[in-house]
Amino acid sequence: MFAFNKKYLLFTCLLLLVEVLIAMYVHDKIIRPYIGDVLVVILIYCFIKAFVKGGTIPVALGVLLFSYLIETMQYFKLVNLLELQKSRLANVVIGNSFSWVDIVAYTVGIAIIILVERLRKA
């Protein structure tokens, strides 16, 4: 089950760098809110695949469910319920604003993963 894969780790590092650059320097209405959310599920998928040998579909669906869970926590204002609204880390990790567009972006990201993995294995 556990197996190190340096290609996925490299992709993880590259995607993390892209996400950090987007967060720091891109303040637009398309790339930061939408492309960033598409890329974040790909980043999480690559990170898991760097250390876990699992099938594309189970890992991708696990990442998607995790992403939906985070978005659901935003819907219920978990940061406020836990009285962590002053914590920058809690606001970044959990977030504080639910959006159906984020759900769509996560789903698109997972669809891209499945498509790319199928094309890669063909």
Image: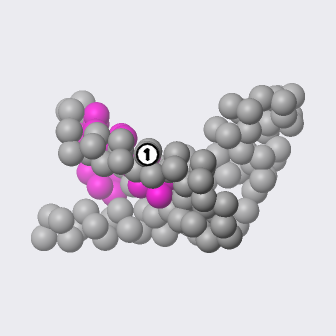
Q: Which residue is pictured at 79% across the width and 36% down the height?
A: 79
Q: Does residue 100 appear left or right of residue 116 in this picture?
A: right
Q: Which residue is pictured at 82% across the width and 44% down the height?
A: 77
Is the residue 86 above or below the residue 29 in the image?
Answer: above
Q: Whole-percent x and y of residue 34?
A: 59, 66
Is the residue 109 above or below the residue 82 in the image?
Answer: below
Q: Whole-percent x and y of residue 16?
A: 44, 45
Q: Which residue is pictured at 25% across the width and 63% down the height?
A: 117
Residue 61 seen by the camera: no
On-image quarter of the C terminus: bottom left
Q: Does residue 96 appear left or right of residue 38 in this picture?
A: right
Is residue 49 covered in magenta?
yes
Q: Whole-percent x and y of residue 45?
A: 39, 49
Is residue 60 covered in magenta?
no
Residue 53 seen by the camera: yes
Q: How crowded is the residue under tag 1: few (<14 C-alpha within 10 Å), some, or many (20+)?
A: few
Q: Residue furthest front?
A: 25
Q: Whole-percent x and y of residue 42?
A: 41, 55
Magenta highlight range: 39-58
Q: Hey, what amino acid is under mark 1?
A: Leu
